[in-house]
Image: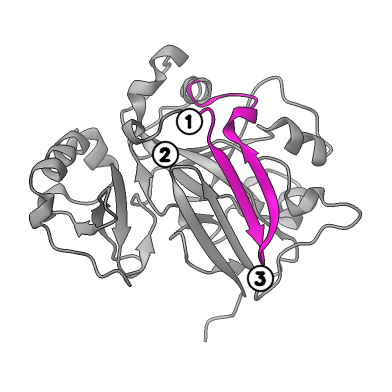
Amino acid sequence: MKLLRYGPSGRERPGIERADGRRLAVPDRFGDYDEAFFADGALTELRSWASRDSAKATPIDPHSRLGPPIARPSKIVCVGLNFRDHALESGMALPAEPVLFFKATSSLAGPNDDVIIPKGGTKVDWEVELAVVIGKAARYVDPAGAAAHIAGYALHNDYSERVFQLERGGQWVKGKSADTFAPLGPWLVTPDDIVDPRNLTMWLTVNGERRQNSTTAHMVFDVPYLVSYVSQFMTLLPGDVISTGTPAGVALGMKPEPKYLRPGDLVELGIEGLGSSRQRVVAYQDQP
C-alpha cells in the first residue's frame, strides 16, 4: 500500500494511491500519518478500509501538491558512509560500526518542493537514500525481529551543505538540517509492496545528467541491522525515520573539481518501487 499526504505545506491531509494509480482521500477518523497513527495500529485498519471501501472515497486532485508522506516525526536518524564506494570517494575510512547523525525534523519537505540553498551556503550536495519509517516502538531489538518494527519505506534526498558540515567544526547535523533539506516521498510504501529492500535500484540526475546509479545491495549495513543498531542507543518511536546512506556519485567526490548545486539546477531521483521525486534549486531570500 502507498500512503501519501497532499495539500499546502503545513496543512497536508492523508491519502493513498491505489495500484491503478488513483489517489484517494482518507477518512478523517484515521487522523494524520503521525506517531499516534502508527502506534495505535491504524495502519492495519487503513489497509482493511482500502481493500473494502476505497472505491467510494473522494478522489484527490491530480494537480495537488504532495507533502512528505508522514507528519513531522520525533527524529530523523541518518547513516553516514554506508556504501563502500561513497566512503572511498569521500576519502573516509569504511566504518566498523554505523556512523549516525541527525537531521532536524524541520528540514522535512515534500518530494517535489524546491530545495533552498541556505543563507551563506556555497556547497550544496545531493544524496539519494532509502528511508525506513518505524511502525512500532523499537528498544534493544534484534536484527531478526527488526521487520516487525517497520511501517514502510520511502525515497529520501539527504541534502547537505558541505561547508557547514565539514568546514565549520562540530557535528555533521549543521550541514544537514537546513529547511527543505529532507524531501521525502512521494509515498510511504508498506513492506508487503517491496519485494526485497536489500536489492533496490537507486539513481539520481542533475540537469538530466546521471550522477548516482547503484543498488541497496551495496550497503555496508543492511536495514534490519540498522534498525537493531540504532535501537541500542535510543528508543525509535512510531513514525521515526532512518535514512540508510547513499552510494557514490555525490558532488563532494567529483574529480578534479566538485560541481555543487546552483540556483536553477534540477535534481531528479528515484528508487525501485518507491517512485521518483524532483527538486528545483533556488537561492535563499531574506524575508521582508
Q: Give the residue number, with chain letter if any, for mark 1.
A: 197
Q: Give the residue number, with chain letter if any, for mark 3.
A: 265
Instruction: Say which amino acid is labelled 3.
Output: Asp
Q: Residue furthest bottom?
A: 288
User: Local crowd at mark 3 within 10 Å, few (<14), some, or many (≥20)?
Assistant: some
- Which of the two labelled residues, at mark 3 and mark 1, occupies the earlier sequence position? 1
The answer to whether residue 246 of the structure is visible from this angle is no
Q: Is residue 58 above or below residue 148?
A: below
- Which of the two labelled residues, at mark 3 and mark 2, occupies the earlier sequence position? 2
Instruction: Say which amino acid is labelled 2.
Output: Tyr
Which residue: 72% across, 25% down? 95
Q: Give the residue number, with chain letter if any, for mark 2.
A: 153
Tell me where residue 44 appears, x and y as whole percent.
18, 34
Tell me where residue 80 appears, x and y as whole percent.
65, 36
Which residue: 42% across, 39% down? 153
Q: Which residues are magenta?
A: 198-224
Residue 79 is left or right of residue 111, and the answer is right
Front position in the image: 186 or 12: 186
Q: Secondary structure at mark 3?
A: loop
- Which of the two labelled residues, at mark 2 and mark 1, occupies the earlier sequence position? 2
Marks 2 and 1: CB-CB under 8 Å?
A: yes
User: Local crowd at mark 1 within 10 Å, few (<14), some, or many (≥20)?
Assistant: some
User: Local crowd at mark 2 within 10 Å, few (<14), some, or many (≥20)?
Assistant: many
Q: Is residue 72 above or below residue 93?
A: below
Instruction: Give the CA separation, mark 3 to mark 1.
Output: 30 Å
Q: Is residue 54 magenta?
A: no
Marks 3 and 1: CB-CB under 8 Å?
A: no
Which residue: 44% across, 45% down? 274
Way the structure is coloured: one colour
